[in-house]
Image (spheres, helix red, strand yellow):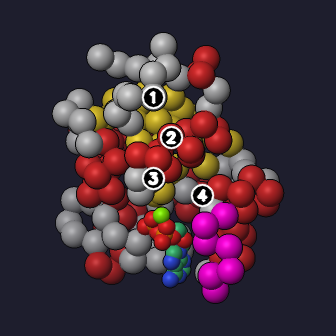
Amino acid sequence: MYNSSHDFTFAIVKPNAVKAGNTGPILAMINKAGFEITAMRMVKLTRAQASSFYDIHRGEEFFIPLIDYMTSGPVVVMILQHQTGNSVGRFRELMGPTDPSEAPEGTIRKLFAESPRMNAIHGADSKMNAEKESNFFFSGIERFYST
Ligand code: ADP
Ligand code: MG
């Protein structure tokens, strides 16, 4: 059953990675890093959905190109739970920084990002946003919690 005290994060395999056939390798990295996938779906975002999801970046110079990119093909949305907790922080570490030229070896962005925009993966940046973003895509009945 859903319980807001549970630890989890929210992630998206972005269009360039799905298109390139890298969904499988990215999911394997996520599992190998100790995350369990507790909800997952493939979806093609509308401009309204992508704009609402990235509302915090509205007005930035990269906003319109970001919405063009995020609606350019299907994405895979998911909720992740790390077996040792701190799912948000551990997943940000596995992703690497926004600009892949700064990403360390072994991160998803080092391996699969094509540019600062087409950077293969999204991960929530706080517990509050993990909750908000998970609720944006998944209803309670689609979510389970691992103990
Ligand atoms: P992150 O995904 O690392 O949390 P942000 O939340 O700052 O990064 O930005 C959201 C997304 O917007 C990034 O993942 C990237 O796709 C795009 N983006 C951010 N900054 C830039 C930039 N300077 N140039 C191009 N795209 C950017
Ligand atoms: Mg962010």
**Quadrant of res 132:** top right
Q: Is residue 83 above or below residue 112?
A: above
Quarter of the picture holding the C terminus: top left
Alpha carbons under labels 3 and 1: distance apart: 16 Å
Where residue 9 sits in the image (x, y, percent)? Answer: 41, 42
Disc 4 to disc 2, C-alpha distance: 22 Å
The boundaries of the magenta stretch are 55-61
User: Which residue in the structure is indicated by mark 2?
Assistant: 131
> Which residue carries the number 4 mark?
15
Asked if residue 59 is among those painted magenta in the image, a careful observer would answer: yes
Q: Nearer the viewer, mark 4 or mark 2?
A: 2
Q: Percent position (x, y) of residue 79?
A: 47, 36
Quick one: label 4 or label 1, which is nearer the N terminus? Answer: 1
Horizontal side, residue 135 vs residue 83: left or right: right
Q: Earlier in the sequence, mark 3 or mark 1?
A: 1
Name the amino acid type tagged 4. Pro
- Callout 3: CB less than 8 Å from ligand 2: yes
Q: Helix or strand or loop: what does disc 4 sit on? A: helix
